[in-house]
Image (cartoon, rainbow, N blue to C red):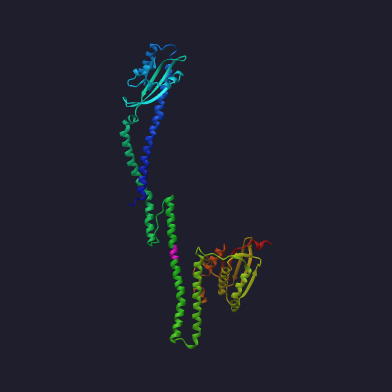
Amino acid sequence: MKIGLTRKISIALVIAFIVSILYASLFSYFLYERLYVNNLKTEMLETGERLAHSYESGPVSDTFIDEVNWFGRKSQFEVFAVKNPRELSMCLPFDVDYETLISGEDRTALLKGEPVYKKGHVERLNRDVISVAIPLLDGKRLEGIIYLYYPLANLSEMTLHYSIYWVAGAVLFLVIALTLWNKWLKKTFKPLKEMRVAAGELSDGNLSVRVADYPDDEIGQLAHTFNEMAESIQKEDERKKEFLANVSHELRTPLSYIKGYMEAIQTGVAPQKDKEKYKQIIMREAARMERLVDDLLDLAKFESKEFTLNKMPVPLAQTIEESIEKVNQRVLQKGIHLERRLNYELIAEVDEERLEQMLLNLLDNAIRHTEDGGRISVTLSLKDESLGLITITDTGTGMPEEDLKKITERFYRVNKARTRKEGGTGLGLSIVEKLAKLHGGSLQIESEIDKGTSVFINLPIMPVSFDK
């Protein structure tokens, strides 16, 4: 049987209460011994010594004994004086032998002028008795003893009168405490129960579930964190659905082209003169699908914790020039004037293959969005002692400022119609941003409508790059 947290805490409270009672009982016995008994012992010693001061010297007189006995009748203690220690047992109201009262060691102590203290149980009285023997010395001769004793009250007797009230009060306190405690626990744990129910709904797929706001304590912070988690899961689910919808759309379009033109060729509907054009369209769309799948695989790979870059010292200018050579044919076809200003001393520890992938994506975007006869500039410079800056600027169409914040999101398009025509996957900038971060750098984009776009990649460089 499962026991709820509220019940566990209530049981813990009862156990703590019982332990407290046991501790109080043990502590009562401790106080009984340390305070009650020790105080009586001290008081008896002081009383006996004051009486002993009345004795001067010589044999103990009957008058002195009568005075001590008279004092005993007025005192809370039983007090009497004897001339011979062996007379003690005859003066006591209970049977006890002389050796028990005054042993050989006790007699030695008395002859030294030291009082003798004893505590023992007397069956006839059914209680402990404490006694003090004060010696009456004349020089080194023991002339008599002042004997004080007191039957100790049992602790049970001391508390018996109050035990019924004490037990009743304890039970009443426990009932009231448990009642108030349970109410407090229900109020305190209500948010936790709500969060448990909400967590169950969340696991069942209700991603819109939230819990109420609570005071800013640990439970309130937990509720706030739960809501943040639920909101994060909901947003991630929405992004996943949007991503799947975009992937489906991006794949469906080239597949429709391929299927339509293949059917036209197979059924003979396509004119003979257009068959070659249709084949080129099929190849273009197949290549587009291949690029899309490759980009998706790359993004999934980059986001995996197991992915690592194969870093090595690389001259950045050399990799930039090699990337430019790979797109140079497209640059020439559009009549674009491409400028390069490169610092050949900068060396960075990067994954050369992934750096080239970043550069090709950015150059492809710049070429695609730059009109025929436009300009593209590529620069590599030292931003500061630890960062190199790669800048790619074009004179293309540019983009609105509100699009800049979303431009690195997957499948985000500023102009969907143009992008479809030009064959972009909508994943290039996402890949570049992810790779820049994996290299310990960053990606920044500035753009203005009809004036062009500038893309900046900041990369950590090696100290050897600026030793000179």
Secondary structure mostly seen in magenta is: helix
- Does 451 appear above or below 147? below
Q: Quadrant of residue 115?
A: top left
Q: Residue at the spot x=50%, y=88% of the render?
A: 273
Residue 148 appears left or right of 304: left
Q: Position of residue 429 (x, y in %)?
A: 53, 68
Q: Residue at the spot x=42%, y=56% of the render?
A: 226
Q: Residue at the spot x=37%, y=37% of the render?
A: 22
- Does 205 appear above or below 149? below
Residue stretch in magenta:
235-239
Q: Residue at the spot x=45%, y=73% of the render?
A: 249
Answer whether residue 236 is magenta in the image: yes
> Is residue 413 in view from this perspective?
no
Residue 76 appears left or right of 286: left
Residue at the right extreme, as displayed: 468
Residue 320 appears left or right of 243: right
Q: Nearer the viewer, residue 25 or 254?
A: 25
Q: Position of residue 345 (x, y in %)?
A: 66, 66
Q: Quadrant of residue 36?
A: top left
Q: Position of residue 9 (x, y in %)?
A: 37, 46
> Is residue 190 in view from this perspective?
yes
- Does 265 appear above or below 140? below
